[in-house]
Amino acid sequence: MFLENLNLNMRSLCCLFLLLTYPNFSFSQATAFFYDTAGNRIRRNAAPDLTPTLEMDGLLFAEEGLRDFIVNIFEINNTETSGSVIFRISKLSSFQITYPLINGLSGVSGGVQNQNNNWDFTENANFIIATSKPGIKIAQGASATIGFSIKRKSGVAAGTLQNLSVTIIGGSGGDVNLENNQSIVKIGTL
């Protein structure tokens, strides 16, 4: 009982110390906020929250089948991004992924305008990496659309299934929520 009371008293002392040291700040469920100088309004420290989606018309590919897909990057915390937004797409052994370097119309859902001109693309053995160009931001509550094409490689057996994934790099664009930074779609061969 003595230890439990001591433990409770230590927590109380720590809280009291923090309140005396930082009287205008408070934390609630990992969302920081502070009181304004008048002391009568609560202001939330806002930061962007980015989340991706993958859209494609059909997930099964005939031999050497080709189709477009788009990556949408949504800002869902009503805060404009800051700095470069970076995401990566997994490269797949059974499919080849390409991308135009200029804006155009992606053949998804009857045609969707993409914003590829706003992005720089690089590749390594495992990923295609897209980085927003300097000065490009995703406005609060808005989105960016980036277009790609995917083609089944010749010689790939029917019934092959692979996961196509897009991942926003944590912290890029000021993103603070890493729990919703990935979208995965399973695609296959006929």
Image (tube, helix red, strand yellow):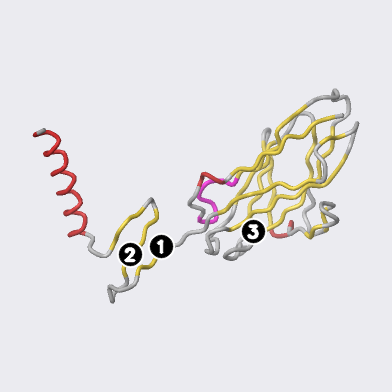
- Disc 2: which residue: 34
| Mark in front: 1 vs 3 | 1
On screen, residue 68 versus residue 73, left or right, reads right
Q: Secondary structure at mark 2?
A: strand
Residue 107: x and y in percent read: 85, 52
> Residue at point 34% right, 72% down?
41
Give the residue furthest to the bottom: 38
- The one nearer the camera, 104 or 1, is 1
Q: Is residue 58 above or below residue 29?
A: above
Earlier in the chain: of badge 2 and badge 1, it is: 2
Q: Any mark on residue 45, and which? A: 1
> Disc 2 vs disc 1: Cβ atoms closer than 8 Å?
yes
- Disc 3: which residue: 133
Give the Cα separation between the discs numbered 1 and 3: 26 Å
The quadrant where residue 60 appears: top right
Q: Is residue 171 magenta?
A: yes
